[in-house]
Image (cartoon, rainbow, N blue to C red):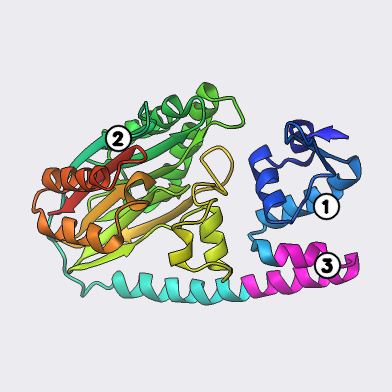
C-alpha cells in the first residue's frame, strides 16, 4: 500500500486532487485508516490515477472522465477520440469568429483616438473571524491584482505571487504580445510561490489585469473573481476553478445550492497546481472593473455588488463600501477588493 503522498508523487496528482476524486467517487482509496482517516492506495491503482490525470490535462469534464474510466480500453479510446474531435470542431468555430472580430475591429475606418487611463483603488481586510489576513490586493498604473492564499503559508504565498508581477507596473507594455508577457510573468509568480510555500496544503489564487492603454489582459486561476460593470450591467469575466463550479457546469448542482455546499471552498486549481486562464478585454471609457477574493462573493450577492459599484462614484469609495458590506454580513473570511475605472 502507498500513502497518499507517495501515491500522489507516483501518479502526478496532488493530494488535494486525490481527496477530491475520492469524494466524487472517481478514484477511491484502497483503504482508509478508521482511526486517523488517512488514505492508502494500492500500486494497481496507479494506472487509473494516471489516466485521470491525463484526461484532466486534456480538459475533459469529471463526469465524462468517470464514464471513460468505467469502459474497457478500446471503448475508452473511441470515447476520447470522439471528445477530442468535438473540441477541435468547437475550436475551429471560435477561430473563425476570432478572425472575423480581429478584421472587423482593425478596420481603418474605425476611429478611436481617445486617450484612456485607469483610476484605481485597492484594499485588503482580515474580516471579523480570521486571525490573520492571507489575501493580497494591489493596484497600480498598469497592474491590478488580487491573490487569496491558503494553508500554513497562505499569506507569504499570496504576497509572493503579486510581488512577482509588480515589475509589469513600471514597464511599457506592447499590446501585440501582452498575453505572452503576462504568461511569462505568471511562470515567475508560480516559482516564487513554490519558494515560499513548499507544503502540499499551501497555495494561492491569482486574478490580475494588465493595462496596455486600450486593452486589459486577464490572468486568472482559482476562485477569486473579476467583474466588469458596463452601462449598468455587471458581468463576471472569470470562471471559478472550484469543485462547486465544476458541479454546476456538469448540471449536478444549481448556483443556489452551491452557496451552501460543504465543498464550496475546495479548489480544483491554484497557482502552482494548474494552468491559468489568459485572455484580452477591449476597454471602453466608463467601464469599471472589480477584482475580489471570495471573502466578498461568498457573503455579498452579485445584485448587491452591482448596487454598490453603481452607487459610489470613486474607486476609493466603492472599495470601502464593498469591504464594509462583507464585514456587515459577518466577515467570515479575509476580503480584498480592487476597483478600477477606465477614464
For disc 3, the marked residue is 77
Comes first in the chain, label 2 or label 3: 3
Comes first in the chain, label 3 or label 1: 1
Badge 2 vs badge 1, beta-carbon distance below 8 Å: no
Of residue 243 and residue 287, the one placed in the foreground of this image is 243
Circle 3 SS class: helix
User: Residue farthest to the top?
Assistant: 196
The residue located at (29%, 61%) in the rendering is 302
Q: Which residues are magenta?
A: 64-87
The residue located at (48%, 76%) in the rendering is 96
Comes first in the chain, label 2 or label 1: 1
The residue located at (78%, 31%) in the rendering is 6
Residue 168 seen by the camera: yes
For disc 1, the marked residue is 48
For disc 2, the marked residue is 128
**19 left or right, relative to 283:** right
Q: CA distance from mark 2 to mark 1?
A: 44 Å
Front disc: 2 or 3? 2
Image coords of residue 108 (percent x, y): 24, 72
Of residue 151 and residue 75, the one placed in the foreground of this image is 151
Front disc: 2 or 1? 2
Amino acid at each position: 500500500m502507498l500513502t497518499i503522498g507517495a501515491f500522489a508523487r507516483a501518479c502526478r496528482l496532488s493530494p488535494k486532487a486525490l481527496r477530491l476524486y475520492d469524494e466524487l467517487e472517481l478514484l477511491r482509496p484502497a483503504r482508509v485508516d478508521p482511526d486517523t482517516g488517512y488514505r492508502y492506495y494500492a500500486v494497481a491503482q496507479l494506472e487509473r490515477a494516471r489516466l485521470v490525470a491525463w484526461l484532466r490535462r486534456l480538459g475533459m469534464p469529471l463526469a465524462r472522465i468517470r464514464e471513460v474510466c468505467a469502459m474497457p480500453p478500446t471503448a475508452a479510446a473511441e470515447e476520447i477520440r470522439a471528445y477530442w474531435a468535438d473540441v477541435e470542431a468547437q475550436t475551429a468555430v471560435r477561430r473563425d469568429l476570432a478572425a472575423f472580430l480581429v478584421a472587423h475591429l482593425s478596420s481603418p475606418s474605425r476611429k478611436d483616438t481617445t486617450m484612456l487611463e485607469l483610476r484605481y483603488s485597492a484594499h485588503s481586510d482580515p474580516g471579523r473571524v480570521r486571525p490573520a489576513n492571507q489575501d493580497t490586493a494591489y493596484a497600480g498604473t498598469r497592474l491590478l491584482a488580487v491573490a487569496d492564499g491558503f494553508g500554513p503559508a497562505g499569506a507569504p504565498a499570496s504576497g509572493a505571487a503579486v510581488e512577482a508581477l509588480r515589475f509589469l507596473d513600471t514597464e511599457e507594455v506592447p499590446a501585440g504580445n501582452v498575453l505572452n508577457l503576462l504568461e511569462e510573468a505568471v511562470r515567475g509568480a508560480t516559482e516564487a510561490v513554490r519558494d515560499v510555500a513548499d507544503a502540499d496544503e499551501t497555495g494561492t489564487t491569482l486574478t490580475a489585469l494588465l493595462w496596455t492603454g486600450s486593452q486589459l489582459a486577464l490572468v486568472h486561476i482559482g476562485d477569486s473573481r473579476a467583474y466588469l460593470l458596463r452601462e449598468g450591467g455587471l458581468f463576471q469575466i472569470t470562471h471559478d476553478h472550484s469543485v462547486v463550479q465544476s458541479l454546476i457546469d456538469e448540471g449536478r448542482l444549481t448556483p443556489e445550492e452551491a452557496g451552501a455546499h460543504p465543498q464550496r471552498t475546495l479548489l480544483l486549481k491554484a497557482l502552482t497546481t494548474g494552468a491559468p486562464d489568459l485572455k484580452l478585454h477591449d476597454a471602453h471609457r466608463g467601464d469599471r472593473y472589480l477584482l475580489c477574493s471570495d471573502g466578498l462573493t461568498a457573503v455579498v450577492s452579485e445584485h448587491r455588488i452591482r448596487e454598490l459599484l453603481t452607487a459610489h462614484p470613486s474607486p476609493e469609495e466603492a472599495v470601502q463600501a464593498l469591504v464594509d458590506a462583507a464585514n456587515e454580513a459577518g466577515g467570515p473570511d479575509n476580503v480584498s477588493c480592487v476597483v478600477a475605472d477606465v477614464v
